[in-house]
Image: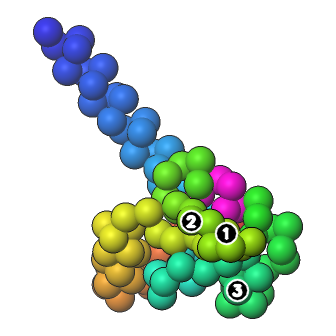
């Protein structure tokens, strides 16, 4: 019984780590931030994030695969959107947390780009 609980906790920790790796890239965060304002097509994301079109497309594929972004066909375009309002809430919570810990995050030498 203890082994099952331990395995479940380990699986949850690993899954959390994998989720946070999805958020860990500045380009993906820029895309998610842009999408918090509503659905956008690739060329709109390129304009708003100032990333290259191939870079945006590559990161959108990752975000789609991870389930953080969803897409809908709109004529000849594909509109991308945040897949759940909880993602927008999480990003807002991160911003609120940063107001408290930004100085420590900046000083931290463990996680460099």
- What's the distance in space between the residues labelled 2 and 1, CA to CA? 6 Å
Residue 5 located left or right of residue 42: left
Q: Secondary structure at mark 2?
A: strand
Q: Secondary structure at mark 1?
A: strand
- Where are the magenta residues, as a range? 59-63
Answer few, some or many: residues within 10 Å of disc 2's Cα (few below 14, many 20 plus, some between 14 and 19): few
Query: 87 or 20, which lies in front?
Result: 87
Whole-percent x and y of residue 103?
Answer: 44, 84
The numbered disc on residue 44 is: 3
Residue 3 located left or right of residue 18: left
Report the residue marked by disc 1. Answer: 78
Residue 2 located left or right of residue 103: left
Kindly identify the residue that appears in the image at 76 percent across and 82 percent down: 43
Q: Secondary structure at mark 3?
A: helix
Query: 97 or 76, which lies in front?
Result: 76
Whole-percent x and y of residue 83?
Answer: 44, 63
The numbered disc on residue 72 is: 2
- Give residue 104's quadrant in the image: bottom left
Q: Is residue 99 magenta?
A: no
């Amino acid at each position: 019984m203890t082994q099952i609980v331990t395995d479940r906790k380990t699986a949850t920790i690993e899954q959390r780590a994998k989720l946070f790796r999805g958020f860990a890239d500045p380009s993906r965060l820029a895309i998610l931030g842009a999408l918090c304002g509503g659905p956008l097509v690739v060329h709109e994301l390129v304009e708003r994030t100032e990333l290259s079109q191939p870079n945006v497309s590559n990161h959108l594929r990752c975000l789609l695969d991870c389930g953080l972004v969803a897409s809908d066909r709109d004529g000849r375009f594909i509109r991308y959107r945040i897949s759940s309002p909880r993602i927008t809430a999480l990003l807002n919570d991160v911003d609120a947390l940063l107001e408290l810990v930004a100085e420590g995050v900046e000083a931290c030498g463990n996680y460099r780009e």
